[in-house]
Image (cartoon, rainbow, N blue to C red):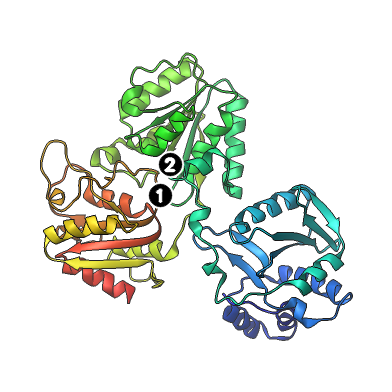
Amino acid sequence: MKSINLLSLSQAHESLDPDEYKSFKRHYEIDIDDDEINDVRTLINEMLSILSFVNIFNDFYVGYKIQHISKEFDLLRFGSNFILNIEIKSESTEEKIKNQLTRNKYYLHHINKVIHNYCFVATSKTLYKLGESGDIEIVALDSLIQLLTSQNLIDLDSPDALFNPSDYLVSPFNSTEKFLTGQYFLTGQQETIKNQITKNITSSSSSVISLTGGAGTGKTLLTYDIVKSRMETMNTVVVHCGQLNDGHQRLINSGWTIVSIKAFRNYDLTSVDLVVVDETQRIYAWQFDKLVVEATSKNTHCIFSYDRQQILSRSEAYTNIEGKVNSISGAYKYNLSDKIRTNKEIANFIKVLFDNKRNNIAVSNCGNIDFDYFTDASNVKNYITLISTEGWEVLRLTPSQYNNEHHESYSQITSKNSHRVIGQEFDNVAVVIDEYFSYGANGELIYTSQTYYDSVKMLFQNITRTRKKLKLIIIGNRQILNRCLSVMN
């Protein structure tokens, strides 16, 4: 994204033909509609009536979005002494303005401790500022103009270089301290669903609620945030359908009640107000049926949180927990659809990797995806040891408890397996693709060696744990290598 002079943008909008103006915006990678630019023009005209210096409108980033998060700012200007943010509204309420500016300060303070946050309401020509105390106040335009003239601008190729998405992608498991101390914000969609679910469980004696969401939608964060918000007023239990991870243990040490589904078999719900079942897609049918019956009899609220794509065995697919939840009369159903953890480069790559007939998806090569090719599995084992010390989380397939499987020959026992990383996120993820992965007649990825768990679904689980960078370690599989080379080139 390129910075632009706001006066130039305004005059281009007024004078250029629609196609010319569209090309002009495309050059600067600006996404702003006509109503928004008209509101910006109102601000410009008010400022020009006070000080007619063109340079105060220089070097603004318009509609910038933080990569992988989709957090957007209307107007940003970066200086070595402070960052300036101006939100533009046609009309709004003071409460909404305060909430947005508070969020913006949170996202910007990782770059510079001095942040000036404003909101200009075009219809009333009113300028609001977020004060040091966290309250908003109406200020004169002169104060904004004075800041613009005193800012020591810095030269940027792109604001992307300043933002580290990992600072904001808070996971209850991998960023437990930030989660517990509330150093995060929910998106608008998450807030709306949270409010609706809170209303459900406070306005009735018992309820059944389903919360679904794909990879990257923030389902885990929302699920655990709901629990955190109810712990003071309700006796809550979190049931995790899998093995507990280190993050679970840290939450337990902080006073949370979290049990694995195996340990939940004889749990007494008599004094439990709320049961949250996380990763419900992995529960057995009899466990689900028993819980619903008992919760109903004890007036216990149930929230079933799940992603139907994140199943690891054929039996989980056959159980069809989503169908069982949907068949419950009176159940409340909510779905997270907005992607907040979306590295588009990796997301598109996953689509074309798992289906070699999907050739209409462009994969940008931004350096976040890498692959190595080996023919000797023993070299791979040593390589995994090496990169594990260099910041890579090497995720392996979960082996059978009963039989030896081929992937165990190159995997490191110290690496986390597919079942251990459910719900977790890592900055840099590496996975191994051996010679038994290939493409079926319909183009979809298959695995031709015998495994107890579904290897393709486990690979999908592991790859979708990625926040920033993905590395494929390919063993003797020229078909997969050529697919990667073709889509990345």
Location of residue 357 by image quarter: bottom left
Rendered residue at 24%/50% (across/down) = 396
Q: Secondary structure at mark 2?
A: loop
How dense is the environment of label 2, judged by Cα within 10 Å: few (below 14), some, or many (20 and up)? many
Q: Is residue 185 above or below residue 119?
A: above
Q: Position of residue 160 (x, y in %)?
A: 53, 68
Mark sitting on residue 250: none
User: Which residue is denoted by mark 1 in the rendering?
Assistant: 425
Task: Give the amino acid at mark 1.
Answer: Glu
Compute the Cα span from label 1 to label 2: 8 Å
Q: Position of residue 113 (x, y in %)?
A: 65, 58
Query: With 213 as the anchor, is 190 left or right in this view?
Result: right
Whichever of callouts 1 and 2 sits on the residue coming sooner in the sequence is 2
Q: Is residue 340 above or below residue 50?
A: above
User: Which residue is denoted by mark 2 in the rendering?
Assistant: 173
How dense is the environment of label 1, judged by Cα within 10 Å: few (below 14), some, or many (20 and up)? many
Rendered residue at 73%/61% (across/down) = 116
Rendered residue at 57%/64% (across/down) = 65
Query: Does any portion of residue 334 appear in the rendered image?
Result: no
Q: Is residue 242 above or below residue 72?
A: above
Location of residue 328 by image quarter: top left
Q: Position of residue 249 (x, y in %)?
A: 40, 33
Query: With 177 as the anchor, is 111 left or right in this view?
Result: right
The quarter of the image holding the N terminus is: bottom right
Q: Position of residue 316 (x, y in %)?
A: 29, 38
Q: Secondary structure at mark 1?
A: loop
- The foreground one among 133 and 354 is 133
Are the residues flagged by discs 1 and 2 in contact, CB closer than 8 Å? Answer: yes
The quarter of the image holding the C terminus is: bottom left
Q: Is residue 419 above or below residue 116?
A: above
Task: Give the amino acid at mark 2.
Answer: Phe
Query: With 172 as the anchor, is 91 left or right in this view?
Result: right
